[in-house]
Amino acid sequence: MFQKIYSPVQKIEINPFSNFFVKRDDLIDPYISGNKWRKLKFILERAKFEGKNHLITFGGAYSNHLVATAAAAARFGLKSSAFVRGEAVKNEMLLLCSLFGMKLIFVDRERYKNKKELFEQNFNTDQNAFFINEGGASAEAVTGCAEIIDELEETYDHVFVAAGTGTTAAGLLKAIQAKDHKTQLHVIPVLKGGEFIREEISRYTSLSTHLNLHNEFHFGGYAKTTPELISFIKKFIAETGLLIDPVYTAKMFYAIFELQNQGKISNNDKILAIHTGGLLGFFGMKDKFNSF
Ligand SMILES: *Cc1c(COP(=O)(O)O)cnc(C)c1O
């Protein structure tokens, strides 16, 4: 059903590292970007297997997952609808969703919490409706994300990934365990109180010593930034030619430099950062970058 994924590994020349590589999942697709495609792939296969052609999902007004689901649905001839958290707004992300034919249903934060109920109340008569959890979190998503590791032709000392729900990290960990790599997986939660990620990962695989959870790089919480993070982003982009987003990947790249600084990883270690995409996230943060 799906074409082969194009996600090269690229070497990045940047001080002080001599073996720094990036897995360019951001190149998979501009809209079905990065780990959102990894997470959707087997979900869409299951929808197809069950003969369902209407995807129903959930997200905030700047959700990469909503755009990815809308674009994937359009591309594979499916319908899509989404419950959007909060009062009705217009922005670039939701514009893309509606261009891809997604029907948007705004619901207040209280009602948004009960997703199964929203699904059942609104789509109980639609035989084609297929429930996809917020962010695509599911066992299928974990299987899809494990393929990131399976595609690698070499092994690395350290693999880094940003985490929102931890589903992507769970897939990576599972694949690393299956290969019995000596690879250390470093997970950077972008939310405050990231310890919950450990629990989320343990729903899908065992918590082995491969896992290193770094809870100190949230910069105040989800979608929060500091002047320090913003200047890191500008410097990193200008020096590497690689775009990173303020919500997810910037916090992960920042962590790599900081852990090197603290002597926890060495300049010569072979490092692979997973670029999980999400570059449309810039649209929610324009104001932070206007003052150049
Ligand atoms: C959604 C997203 C993540 C988080 O993935 P989880 O599986 O929820 O941990 C990381 N990076 C980017 C760019 C994302 O859009």
Image (cartoon, helix red, strand yellow):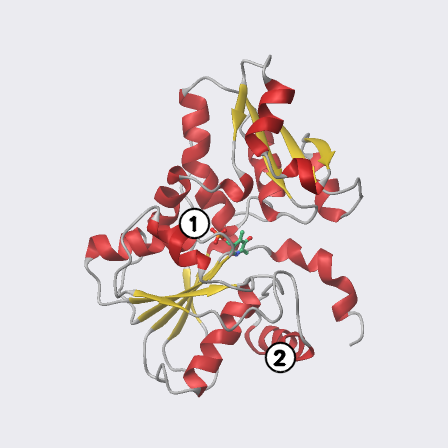
Task: Give the position of the N terminus as an image quadrant.
Answer: top left
In depth, the one of 110 and 14 nearer the eye is 110
Apparent side of residue 195 relative to residue 270 in the rendered image (left or right): right
Label 2 neighbour load within 10 Å: few <14, some 14-19, many 20+: few
Which type of secondary structure does the marked residue at label 1 adopt? helix
Q: CA distance from mark 1 to mark 2?
A: 30 Å
For the image, the number of numbered tags is: 2
Q: Amino acid at mark 1?
A: Thr
Q: Which residue is mark 2?
A: 235
Q: How far across and down, in percent of the image, does residue 205 sit?
A: 29, 49
In depth, the one of 238 and 272 nearer the eye is 272
Label 1 neighbour load within 10 Å: few <14, some 14-19, many 20+: many
Apparent side of residue 78 relative to residue 38 in the rendered image (left or right): right
Q: Which label lies toward us, 1 or 2?
A: 1
Disc 1 within 8 angstroms of ligand 1 (CB): yes
| Residue 136: image tag | none
Q: Which residue is mark 1?
A: 167
